[in-house]
Image: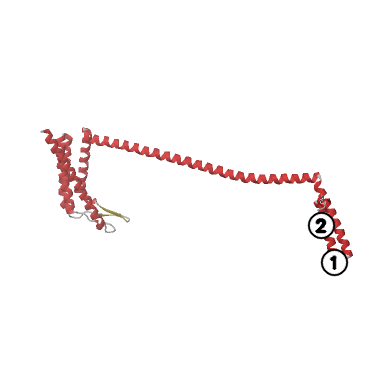
Amino acid sequence: MPKDEKEKSPVESFGDMVKEFGETVSKIFNDPELKKKSKEFAKSAEDSAKAFGKRFKDEGVKEKFEDFKKAARGFGNSVSDYFKSDKEREEETHDVEYEWEKKLDEKMKKFGERAEEAGKKFDRKMKKVGDKVDSYFKDTRGGRITGYSFAIMWSVIFFVLFNFYQSYIAYYHYDGIWHRYPLLTESFSQWLPIVSVALVASMIGNILLIIYDGYFFRRIIRIILNLFGISAVISLLIIFPFDFTVFPRDLTGILNPIVIVVLILIIMGMVIDTMVRAIKLIFYTGRSY
């Protein structure tokens, strides 16, 4: 390639290209007027390109483009920083939430441990209180007398209720006025003497224990009272003076077996208690001799 072509600027090359294009078109159409116009267009394009190229070389234009480049770079950095800040804020928010949840979990764990420990302490205290109360009623004279007094009081209450107010053992219904439907049948009169004797025996036995409650005497009285109680409950189970048909829905099929099971459990408990007391009394008597 000739040396002068290498040294041509892009603008000059662009002008030559336009000039050659105009001459080529004029040759194709072989029109002198078109050839003239093409040369004028090529000359005008070359001059415009040279003027445009010179403007790019001016310091003012360079500075403007430098300013534009800086502004564009600043805009890009600003956008990058904005989204970067959002991400950092999101990460910071996530970290704060995580730390808050972690602290909350730790506090809940500590609260649970303290509550569990407090529950254990409360159970231990209640057990101690229960042991003290039980020890008071069993091991102290004043506690045993208190127990005897309550036993007498309840025996009197049930004796009066069964003998004078048995009709109040009933189902009550209100529809403007109160209606009373007794739960006890006429066969209750067969059980009344038995339970009355057992209650009177309980009153007399506990009065005697208030007067004197030596170990041997106390065990004998408890066994006798248990035998009266077992007789009363067994006779109640046999006679079964209950009528559950007075309820709005006949509950006989449900309440009858429930009451029977409860009475059997009471009898078994009293029998076991009586046997344990009798065995302890035998061992006590054998050691005494």
Q: Is residue 84 left or right of residue 115?
A: right
Q: How many marks?
A: 2
Residues under numbered marks 1 and 2 in contact, where contact means CB atoms less than 8 Å apart? no
Determine which residue is flagged by label 1: 29
Q: Residue 117, how many percent across, how many down?
A: 37, 37
| Residue 44 vs residue 262, the one in the foreground | 44
| Residue 130 vs residue 282, the one in the foreground | 282
Task: Say which element carries label 1.
Answer: helix
Amino acid under disc 2: Met
Give the CA separation, mark 1 to mark 2: 19 Å
Other residues around mark 2 within 10 Å, as few (<14) / some (14–19) / many (≥20): some
| Among the two numbered marks 1 and 2 on one chain, the one whose residue lies closer to the N terminus | 2
Task: Say which element carries label 2.
Answer: helix
Q: Say if 236 sits above or below 121 in the image.
A: below
Q: Is residue 242 left or right of residue 48?
A: left
Query: Which quarter shows the C terminus?
Result: top left
